[in-house]
Amino acid sequence: MPLKVAGPGAAAPSQSGMDGIDYELGADYWSKVDPTIDGMLGGFAQISPLDIEGSSKFLKWCLKGSWSESGSPSTGRALDCGAGIGRVTKYLLQRHFQTVDMVEQDAKFLDHSRAYLGPTSKVDQRFCSGLQSFTPQSAHYDVIWSQWVLGHLADSDLVAFFQRCARGLKANGVLIVKENTTSSDTVEQDPQDGSVTRPDALLKSLFAQADLVLIKDLQQLKFPAELYPVKMYALRPKTASDSPDEAKLKAVGMLPD
Ligand SMILES: C[S@@+](CC[C@H](N)C(=O)[O-])C[C@H]1O[C@@H](n2cnc3c(N)ncnc32)[C@H](O)[C@@H]1O
């Protein structure tokens, strides 16, 4: 789902099944897109440096680990989800991690990423797969980054994908999501590429359904006003200490003895 102009005419509210998602249409749409930054960003290549600047600040804050009681994430390996030709890998993840893996459903983009990233790239694995059927290796990643792709997944597939990502994180690892959001409370469907744009509240509900805890969220600043608001979310898997234990609940009378 590239950067898109928000507002009337840009998209229609979702009505069909699968939450308005059409996987076939999505794959077909991307198969016709040029393997360029402009292609990745729906004709808004000029905002790429600003996007990277915002992401970089957000990532640095996450890596400091002030949010964590058990330590900061390490900088060993990151996963770029819906990586396209590797724009995020090139300008963001490679600068912070020793190794980066990419997952992308369109083989042409992954092939092109070899020339785009060059021989000195830090990319190890390139997985050609839809995120709806991709499982990251268990306890393998310090950061899993998903940007401008999750609107292609139906709600139930997205929750299941988040759950698999949670299992793919190392100790103190973080899942980072950067996506368009609607300003309205409704899901907006794009009939061109079979994707949706979700409101912030729905994204947060899907995170919670996947047992993810929101560490921080922030809106990307300085993007053109006509675009959908773009938000960044840092998430970690829920741990036992996040849920009050039974004894505590009993002590305050919220559970029978
Ligand atoms: C808007 S581009 C974003 C690329 C990259 N994340 C960036 O920010 O430069 C969306 C990418 O997601 C990929 N994509 C679309 N649906 C996907 C799916 N179901 N699973 C994996 N990748 C998908 C497209 O092929 C395309 O490369």
Image: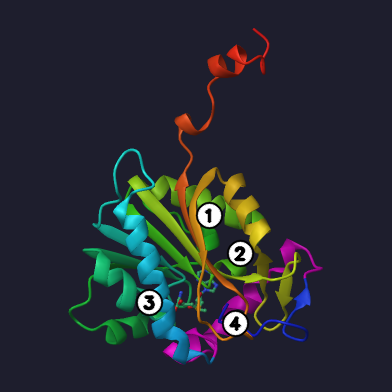
Between tags 1 and 4, which lies in front?
1
Q: Nearer the viewer, residue 157 or 49?
A: 49
Q: Nearer the viewer, residue 222 or 206?
A: 222
Q: Quadrant of residue 143?
A: bottom left
Amino acid at dot 2:
Leu
| Among the two numbered marks 3 and 4 on one chain, the one whose residue lies closer to the N terminus | 4
| Among the two numbered marks 4 and 2 on one chain, the one whose residue lies closer to the N terminus | 4
Which residue is at 64% across, 74% downward? Answer: 24
Amino acid at dot 4:
Asp
Tag 1–tag 2 contact (CB < 8 Å): yes
Q: CA distance from mark 3 to mark 4?
A: 31 Å
- Name the residue carrying label 3: 53
Which residue is at 67% across, 18% downward? Answer: 254
Q: Which mark is residue 161?
A: 1
Q: Residues within 10 Å of mark 3 (few under 14, many from 20)?
A: some
Q: Residues within 10 Å of mark 1 (few under 14, many from 20)?
A: many
Q: CA distance from mark 3 to mark 2?
A: 27 Å
Tag 3–tag 4 contact (CB < 8 Å): no
- Name the residue carrying label 2: 153
Q: Which residues are magenta?
A: 14-42
Q: CA distance from mark 1 to mark 4?
A: 22 Å
20, above or below 168, in the image = below
Q: Quadrant of residue 252?
A: top right
Q: Is mark 2 within 8 Å of ligand 1?
A: yes
Q: CA distance from mark 4 to mark 2?
A: 15 Å
